[in-house]
């Protein structure tokens, strides 16, 4: 790698990982192309997204300048501030579309749950890296408690997508810290063992029905199933090579709901087909593998745990979003990373990649 | 201690982390494989299925109604046309609340109860996102008012459409009929696809009986719609095939002359061209305006029309059954001659009554003191009843029935509009079958003067007259003369249909009857001699008739002062002219008109005069061109050539296209 040579490149000195950056820019470029189509060729919307992308890129570059060590030291404080803000949201937050997620800070509105996507793995990485690896059971219980507090606060907003992502970010930290497979499978079995009697004895019919509809939306074609049915039609009718850019009938004729946010993948699949999807997924895979590579090269437990969590959360983003729009996962509001329209999520994502770049480019200083 | 442990763990940590990273890579690959499998299944395996669903989503097929064929009279004067009109329709899915919308609309334009009722009925049967008409034929002012307020009226749209209009709505209501909005009963019978864009169908007259030809073929357009059903663009269009134009044999000017001649009297007139059975005029009085029915008549007007004792909606020409009275005399005279019951020199003495042997009952002649010595000519000219009492008794009812059937009495004439009644020419079998009684000789006697059970419709009487005039060719009366398909350069003629040829024993017999009928007008003592004018270029043959009314009792409600009027006899007249070269045969019935010669005959005279005025002297004298008589049409028709194509064949063809 050029970046590892004795005389570090300009990019390395600017704390930029060029390989990762190129992957991200390629994804963002594809995202902009498809967003243009999905938004109904709205230039206003493109402009707003471009501004956000600009902010997100700057945030990434700024965060890359901060050394992982500094981050580690600030982790508990950031976490506590985050928890306070989550509580504040529940008390004085602004309601948008039935969910109370926003804090009005006068100048701009802020979504504290977004911040927790990074703050929770940082906190857990801080906590676990300061103890034994693999963590003892006592530490594990504390770690789970640290995770549970913000997840419950976010789920109460309610924001199922974000709490899912925060949970997986936290769990990935714990997983990377080396929890024994016995414990992992033990938890999984315990979960199943808990679910079955609850399903059989505790839940009422309407509750079961609600869960079943969430798992199989097609059973309710006019209600919650409508989105998924239209999305599957969009994806399936795309075929091998798609209907062509700007030619997606499902999206342009407005059959597809949420087409520039959560369901943007369906627009892409309809217009560019299976071949387009393979290219998009390859790019995602490229970014993920580059991320994993960076974490394996990372120095320090905190960096490794945090870096791996960020990369694997990115993976969960992709899997949940595509799984959801293609009908194998229930509908939870998770955007397609770097492609979906939406401000806060893209800034958080890029900030995460900023952390990865920081981990990668601050290595030497720690190593020698 | 802590430092030591930290160093010790460093190696284990590295290893754990290494293992977990490999697990993470596998984890990533597994999740990605799942996604790729799923997307492969959707996009490659199920591609066709989803493509179909996607097509169904966005493409909807809309029907384009064909333009209804026009109807012309024999001279090309338009009788039924399509005028552009504005229709207000509502797409219920786009209207927030139908009731408030209707309320708002009723403040802007007049909405009759029937409009709202029909609209609500149709809301239930139409497909989603289809406009349902509420008001037809908006005035320019109404269009302007609604257009200005359109933004406050979601779901309302104004559509330019063609609407049926009858320039001679009153004159032709009983012939051309009218179209009206399709009702539920018709909906079940009409071909669904072909009528998917059509709101109206023929309800009466030619409009109804030629519906299949007039309607045309529906066109369609495939349109791309968005999720709210709004049309974004037309993908494919197949133009509708307009309906066929029809040319009638009817002469609207002649029709107007006839209506004028009726003044305010009630009755019917049918004029037929005896050379081919073409119907030249067909009048049923009183009449009404057919245009009232096109876009839904309001219940008050309809009730007034329907319950009026004058029965304007009743088409007397084909539905009115009248005792023919003395107008049957020429037929029975001919029957006696042709059946060899009497000879040309037959003569009776008329004492003013007739009595069956051994019976005391006297059958009276209209002339109390009798006609004295009466031969065939005198019996017709002066309308001697006794002559025919005797003749009928000699012939017997079955022979009379059989002979009269040759002329179309007692059967539907087969005219090309619906609703015809068959009249009645009784026989012994008929009475046994229907009345379950034996035939009495006295009933034969009164049948001889066209009374008793005998009933005819004006179309039958006109047709019988035409058959008598042309020497025994019994045609099927035809209203439609030719059919113009839009694709064809020329209209196809509907060829005359001979139902049967009356067998002829001796031509002299026919001439004798013709002569006698001519004397009715031109003889010094003829019952219709008032038609004889010195400047006539031709001679008229005819026979008057007066029929007793016995249907009054059936009518429950009538005013006292109307009673006398309504008890009066019906006046009848049958006639053809010119007598030696018939070009028009005519039957007139004037209800409660009194005597045929004074009331019915003048009406016929005016129509004959108007019709024959178009012919030159030479044309009037020109003998009937056909030397040989046409053969009657067989039931099972051999393939017809295009020129002599007939309605049935074209109808058949139309159905194949559909």
Image: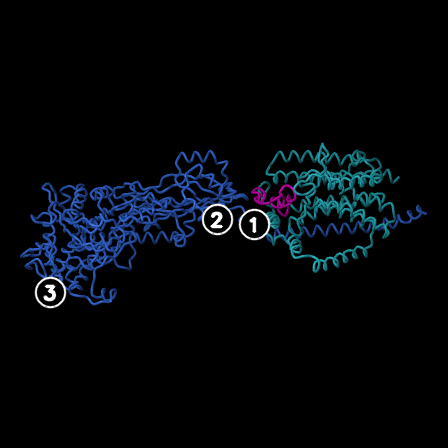
Chain colours: A cyan, B blue
Count of marks placed on residues = 3
- Whether label 1 touches label 2, CB < 8 Å: no
Write down the residue under mark 3.
Answer: B360
Front residue (pair A103, A246): A103
Is tag 2's residue or tag 3's residue first in the polypeptide sequence? 2
Q: Is residue A80 left or right of residue B318?
A: right
Outermost residue toward the right in this view: B1
Whole-number angstrom distance, CA of label 2 to CA of label 3: 75 Å
Residue B617 in picture, x, y percent from top left: 13, 42
Query: Quick check: can you spot residue A349?
Result: no
Sequence-earlier tag: 1 or 3: 1
Q: Label 3 near label 2: C-beta < 8 Å?
A: no
The answer to whether the residues at label 1 and label 3 have Cβ atoms under 8 Å apart is no
**Residue located beneath label 1 in the image:** B51
Tell me the distance, in whole angstroms, between the alpha carbons under discs 1 and 3: 94 Å
Q: Are marks 2 and 3 on the same chain?
A: yes
The residue labelled by disc 2 is B127
Residue A187: in magenta span: no
Residue B458 locus on image (x, y percent) = 22, 52
- Give a yes or no on whether discs 1 and 3 share a subunit: yes
Q: Nearer the viewer, mark 2 or mark 3?
A: 3
Q: Residues within 10 Å of mark 2 (few under 14, many from 20)?
A: few
Q: Magenta residues?
A: A248-275
Q: Does label 1 or label 2 sit earlier along the sequence?
A: 1
**Element under label 3?**
loop
Q: CA distance from mark 1 to mark 2?
A: 23 Å
Image coords of residue B263 (percent x, y): 21, 42
Residue B515 in the figure: left or right of residue A360: left
Let me know if residue A251 is in the magenta part. yes
């Amino acid at each position: 790698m050029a970046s590892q040579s004795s005389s570090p490149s300009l990019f390395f000195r600017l704390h930029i990982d060029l390989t990762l950056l190129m992957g991200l820019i390629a994804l963002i470029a594809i995202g902009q192309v498809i967003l243009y189509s999905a938004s109904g060729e709205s230039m206003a919307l493109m402009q707003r997204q471009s501004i956000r992308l600009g902010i997100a890129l700057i945030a990434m570059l700024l965060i890359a300048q901060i050394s992982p060590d500094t981050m580690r030291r600030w982790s508990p404080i950031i976490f506590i501030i985050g928890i306070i803000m989550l509580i504040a949201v529940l008390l004085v937050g602004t309601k948008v579309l039935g969910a109370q997620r926003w804090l009005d800070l006068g100048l701009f509105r802020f979504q504290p749950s977004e911040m927790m996507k990074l703050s929770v793995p940082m906190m857990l990485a801080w906590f676990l890296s300061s103890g034994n690896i693999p963590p003892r059971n006592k530490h594990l219980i504390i770690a789970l408690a640290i995770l549970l507090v913000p997840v419950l606060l976010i789920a109460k907003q309610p924001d199922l997508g974000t709490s899912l992502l925060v949970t997986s970010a936290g769990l990935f930290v714990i997983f990377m810290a080396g929890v024994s497979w016995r414990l992992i499978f033990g938890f999984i079995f315990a979960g199943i063992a808990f679910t079955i009697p609850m399903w059989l004895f505790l839940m009422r019919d309407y509750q079961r029905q609600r869960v079943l509809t969430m798992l199989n939306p097609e059973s309710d074609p006019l209600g919650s199933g409508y989105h998924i049915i239209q999305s599957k039609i969009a994806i399936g009718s795309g075929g091998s090579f798609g209907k062509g850019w700007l030619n997606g009938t499902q999206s342009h004729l407005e059959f597809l709901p949420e087409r520039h946010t959560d369901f943007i993948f369906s627009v892409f699949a309809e217009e560019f087909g299976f071949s387009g999807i393979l290219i998009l997924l390859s790019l995602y895979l490229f970014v993920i593998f580059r991320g994993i590579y960076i974490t394996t090269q990372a120095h320090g437990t905190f960096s490794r745990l945090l870096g791996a969590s960020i990369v694997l959360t990115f993976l969960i983003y992709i899997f949940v979003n595509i799984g959801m729009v293609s009908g194998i996962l229930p509908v939870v509001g998770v955007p397609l990373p770097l492609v979906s329209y939406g401000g806060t999520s893209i800034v958080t994502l890029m900030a995460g990649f900023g952390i990865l770049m920081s981990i990668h480019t601050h290595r030497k200083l720690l190593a020698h | 201690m802590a430092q030591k442990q930290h160093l010790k763990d460093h190696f284990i940590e590295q290893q754990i982390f290494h293992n977990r990273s490999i697990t993470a890579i596998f984890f990533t690959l597994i999740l990605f494989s799942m996604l790729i499998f799923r997307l492969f299944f959707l996009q490659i395996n199920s591609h066709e299925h989803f493509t179909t669903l996607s097509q169904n989503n966005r493409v909807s097929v809309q029907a384009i109604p064909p333009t209804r064929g026009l109807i012309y009279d024999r001279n090309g004067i338009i009788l039924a046309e399509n005028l552009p009109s504005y229709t207000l329709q509502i797409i219920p899915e786009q209207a927030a609340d139908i009731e408030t919308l209707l309320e708002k609309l009723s403040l802007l334009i007049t909405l009759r109860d029937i409009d709202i009722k029909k609209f609500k009925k149709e809301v239930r049967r139409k497909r989603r996102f289809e406009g349902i008409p509420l008001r037809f034929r908006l005035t320019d002012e109404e269009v302007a008012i609604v257009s200005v307020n359109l933004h406050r009226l979601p779901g309302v749209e104004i559509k330019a459409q063609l609407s049926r209009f009858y320039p001679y709505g009153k004159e032709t209501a009983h012939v051309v009929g009218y179209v009206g909005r399709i009702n539920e009963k018709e909906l079940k019978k009409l071909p669904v696809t072909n009528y998917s864009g059509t709101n109206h169908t023929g309800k009466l007259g030619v409009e109804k009986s030629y519906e299949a030809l007039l309607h045309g073929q529906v066109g369609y357009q495939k349109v791309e719609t968005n999720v709210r059903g709004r049309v974004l663009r037309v993908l494919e269009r197949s133009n509708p095939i307009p309906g066929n134009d029809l040319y009638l044999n009817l002469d609207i000017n002649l029709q107007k002359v006839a209506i004028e001649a009726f003044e305010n009297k009630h009755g019917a007139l049918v004029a037929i061209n005896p050379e081919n059975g073409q119907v030249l005029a067909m009048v049923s009085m009183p009449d009404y305006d057919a245009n009232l029915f096109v876009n839904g008549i309001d219940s008050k007007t309809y009730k007034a029309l329907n319950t009026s004792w004058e029965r304007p909606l009743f088409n007397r020409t084909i539905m009115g059954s009248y005792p023919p009275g003395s107008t049957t005399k020429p037929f029975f005279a001919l029957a006696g001659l042709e059946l060899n019951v009497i000879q040309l020199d037959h003569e009776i003495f008329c004492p003013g009554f007739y009595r069956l042997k051994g019976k005391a009952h006297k059958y009276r002649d209209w002339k109390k003191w009798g006609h004295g010595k009466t031969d065939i000519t005198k019996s017709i000219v002066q309308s001697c009843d006794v002559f025919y009492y005797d003749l009928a008794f000699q012939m017997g009812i079955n022979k009379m029935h059989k002979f009269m059937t040759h002329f179309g009495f007692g059967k539907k004439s087969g005219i090309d509009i619906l609703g015809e009644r068959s009249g009645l020419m009784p026989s012994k079998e008929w009475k046994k079958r229907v009345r379950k009684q034996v035939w009495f000789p006295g009933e034969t006697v009164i049948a001889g003067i066209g009374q008793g059970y005998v009933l005819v419709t004006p179309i039958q009487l006109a047709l019988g007259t035409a058959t008598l005039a042309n020497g025994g060719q019994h045609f099927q009366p035809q209203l439609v003369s030719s059919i113009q398909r839009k694709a064809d350069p020329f209209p196809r003629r509907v060829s005359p249909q001979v139902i049967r040829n009356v067998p002829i024993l001796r031509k002299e017999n026919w001439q004798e009857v013709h002569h006698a009928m001519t004397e009715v007008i031109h003889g010094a003592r003829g019952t219709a001699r008032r038609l004889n004018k010195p400047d006539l270029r031709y001679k008229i043959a005819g026979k008057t008739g007066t029929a007793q009314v016995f249907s009054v009792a059936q009518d429950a409600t009538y005013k006292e002062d109307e009673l006398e009027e309504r008890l009066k006899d019906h006046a009848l007249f049958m006639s053809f002219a010119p007598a030696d070269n018939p070009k028009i045969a005519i039957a007139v019935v004037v209800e409660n008109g009194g005597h045929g010669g004074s009331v019915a005959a003048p009406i016929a005279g005016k129509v004959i005069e108007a019709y024959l005025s178009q012919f030159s002297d030479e044309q009037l004298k020109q003998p009937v061109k056909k030397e040989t008589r046409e053969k009657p049409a067989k039931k099972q028709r051999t393939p017809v050539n295009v020129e002599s194509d007939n309605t049935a064949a074209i109808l058949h063809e139309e159905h194949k296209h559909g």
